[in-house]
């Protein structure tokens, strides 16, 4: 069956299964329910290269504090992502949402506790029209190439992140 499918992640066991770098090809919508576990770290390459993924809802990942490298890297079909569950995240590794060319907007307001941003944060997301970095006021460390390739209509001053 080639029709689009939604995958709802309900348990820690399902998340561990997701360490495989790609979703099944027919999954285009992914949601994390209010999971009953203490998942605090997502490792490198989490769902990177999931080419058919269109929407992601991370609202159920409230305990997450560290995101490894290549988080949703090169998910070039990704159009919408709900980051509202990431309010406790303090660190994101290199390649956070890098090369997600179909994204037109991303709401970073839930990332207000973020202190460390790796290289290539939202880089080469050529569809982004505007990005508000003001919620990232607590960031003290930023890797190079933040928003590399940004072509949006709103000017960005990444140097303003570090006071």
Image: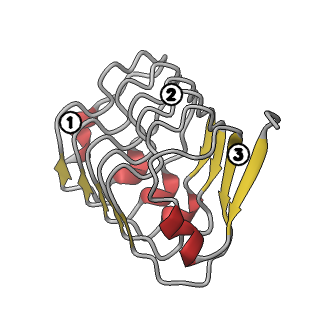
Residue 35 position in % (x across, y down):
62, 77
- Cα distance in 3D space between marks 3 and 1: 34 Å
Query: Do the residues bearing badges 1 and 2 touch, measured as CB atoms within 8 Å?
Result: no
Quadrant for residue 90, please give it.
bottom left
Sequence-earlier tag: 3 or 2: 3
What residue is drawn where x is 31% and y is 40%? Answer: 95
CA gap between label 3 and label 2 equals 23 Å
Of labels 3 and 1, the one closer to you = 3
- As measured in the structure, the alpha-carbon distance from the residue carrying label 1 to the one carrying label 2 is 17 Å
Residue lying farthest to the front in this orientation: 1
Which x, y percent locates residue 147?
A: 33, 30
Q: Residue 130 shows which numbered tag? A: 2
State the image coordinates of residue 85 (x, y, percent, origin top left): 56, 65
The label number, if any, that marks residue 29 in the structure image: 3
Label placed on residue 159: 1
- Callout 3 crowding tier (Cα within 10 Å): few <14, some 14–19, many ≥20: some
Foreground: 134 or 104? 104
Q: Dot 1, crowdedness within 10 Å: few (<14), some or many (≥20)? A: few
């Amino acid at each position: 069956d080639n029709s689009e499918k939604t995958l709802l992640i309900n348990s820690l066991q399902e998340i561990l299964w997701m360490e495989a770098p790609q979703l099944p090809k027919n999954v285009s919508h992914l949601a994390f329910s209010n999971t009953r576990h203490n998942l605090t770290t997502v490792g490198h390459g989490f769902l990177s290269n999931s080419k058919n993924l269109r929407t992601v809802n991370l609202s159920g990942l409230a305990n997450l504090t560290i995101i490894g490298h290549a988080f949703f890297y090169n998910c070039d079909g990704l159009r919408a992502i709900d980051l509202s569950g990431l309010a406790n995240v303090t660190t994101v590794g290199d390649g956070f949402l890098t090369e997600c060319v179909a994204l037109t907007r991303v709401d970073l307001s839930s990332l207000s506790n973020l202190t460390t941003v790796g290289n290539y944060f939202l880089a080469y997301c050529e569809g982004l029209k505007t990005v508000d970095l003001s919620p990232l006021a607590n960031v003290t460390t930023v890797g190079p190439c933040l928003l590399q390739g940004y072509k949006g209509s709103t000017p960005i001053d990444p140097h303003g992140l570090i006071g």
